[in-house]
Image: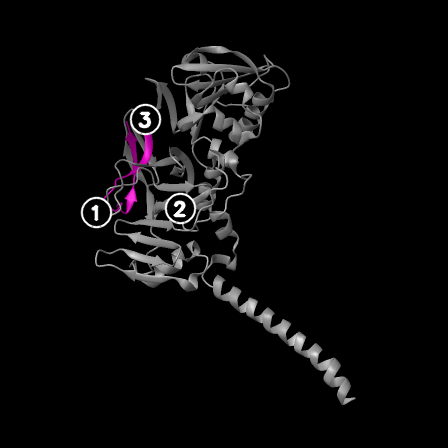
Amino acid sequence: MPDKIKYQYIPKAKSLLIIGLAALSVFLTARLWLVHIPNHSFTPYVRARFASTVPDEASDLVRPFRIMQGSGDGYFAVLYRDIRNSAQWFYGEQIITDVLQNGNFIGVTETDMAHVMDAPVLIYQYAFNMRAAVFAEAFGPRMDATLMGNGVSQFNSIAIHPPDGERNTLNIFFIGGAYTWEFVLLNNAPEFHIPSARGEMHRLVFEDDRFISRLTSLSHHPVSFTNPYRDHAGQLNLSHIRGQVSHFFANPATINQGVSAGGVYTFSNLSTVVRYLPWDVIEYTSFRTISRSSPTSLVTDFSAAFAFVVDDPNVRNDFFLAGYEDLGRERVFWFGYTVGNFPIKLTEYWYTGPECANPLVHPIEVTVDNGRVIRYRRIVYNFAPDPGHVSMASLGNGELSFSITGRTQPRNHIALQVVE
């Protein structure tokens, strides 16, 4: 019996003990790695840094920054808020997909906005010139023939005339500055009811080639701002900021930290540096080795940039693509914010500190190299309407927005302004 215990049971017990210790080691290591990661999950970290080869949210690339809708009477309602989930964009995506697959080309003409707007219309506007090839790629493979085959190179607006009780056809216009390309869906296009905007408080008219407000005044809730990197006493300190930036690191336990005499708070390890800069800008830089095995498309790079912003827990406003630029092997994407049903606009460049030579031109900037984010800069503030305050804005002809100015901290509240 002793020999049986020695040669049969003891080895089994040792094996079970080794397995148990290995499992405990993995568990404790995971706890150490995840201690500063929100919700104790690797998912946001992985999604933010390693873009899928087939982007899940490519349609966000072609989502407009605003939608105008008019019933044909000269007045337009504007939508900035939550466009991704709006009925107007759900309808627009469906129609655009159908046109790319089955649309019939009518012709190209000099742009005549009066003709576009003399019937009930939905107008999807972009903050930049959208390249037709990129637009079609975001809708799927082999979707570019309809646009590229008919000479559409780029555009900044798409207008749709939904069918009504008097006609069954649907007309869609790709508007690119001086020229407009018109297509038609002949059969079974769904309808979309567009009420008059004449009674809307925030209604616009089209004048001098732009949509403007003719309101002389508007009562509204001003916007308040918060800085999540300041502690409950409103102060900046290493401990609190570290907790807000730890999600940028694969292993927060490896973070080194310090603050310079110039007020720069720095958090780093061998591959990542995150800095809180003096004029309220957070900056992430990655030094990881980048694979050059195959180049990435603009759609894939956008997906990486978009996922990175989505997975930043301190971004709490809706945001939209405001533009992008190709810089050789790198691409830079800029994003703007909306609050309530208005945009947030920078009226000046936003400098990151006294020595800044490369200011922000939009609230968020993301640089992507071969499908991976290598640099991320963002104004730290979040914005929200303050229901406890009411402001009366004195307005003129122009577009309405909540505007902030670089180099200066926002006031306690930001009121609506007209941006010429």
Which residue is more in the foreground, 361 or 114? 361
Which residue is more in the foreground, 245 or 24? 24
Instruction: Kindly identify the amino acid type of the residue bearing the numbered disc 1.
Output: Glu
Please name the residue that numbered disc 3 is placed on.
215
Q: Residue 355 carries which label?
A: 1
Residue 304 appears anywhere in the view? yes
Circle 3 Cα neighbour tier, 10 Å, few/some/many (<14 / 14–19 / ≥20): some
> Disc 3 and disc 2: Cα gap in Å?
44 Å
Give the mark, 3 or 2, whose residue is nearer the N terminus: 3
Magenta highlight on residue 406: yes
- Position of the N terminus, as image quadrant, is bottom right
Which of the 4 image quarters holds residue 26?
bottom right
Q: In this view, does 211 lie to the left or right of 82?
A: left
> Disc 1 and disc 3: Cα gap in Å?
41 Å
Name the residue at 41% across, 63% down.
254
Residue 386 appears anywhere in the view? no
Q: Give the range drawn in magenta.
A: 400-420
Give SS at disc 1.
loop
- Position of the C terminus, as image quadrant, is top left
Q: Where is residue 170 in the image (x, y as percent from the top left)?
A: 56, 17
Magenta highlight on residue 193: no
Q: Which mark is residue 163?
A: none
Please name the residue that numbered disc 2 is placed on.
374
Q: Is residue 391 left or right of residue 121?
A: left
Which residue is more in the foreground, 216 or 172? 172
Give the mark, 1 or 2, whose residue is nearer the N terminus: 1
Which of the 4 image quarters holds residue 339?
top left
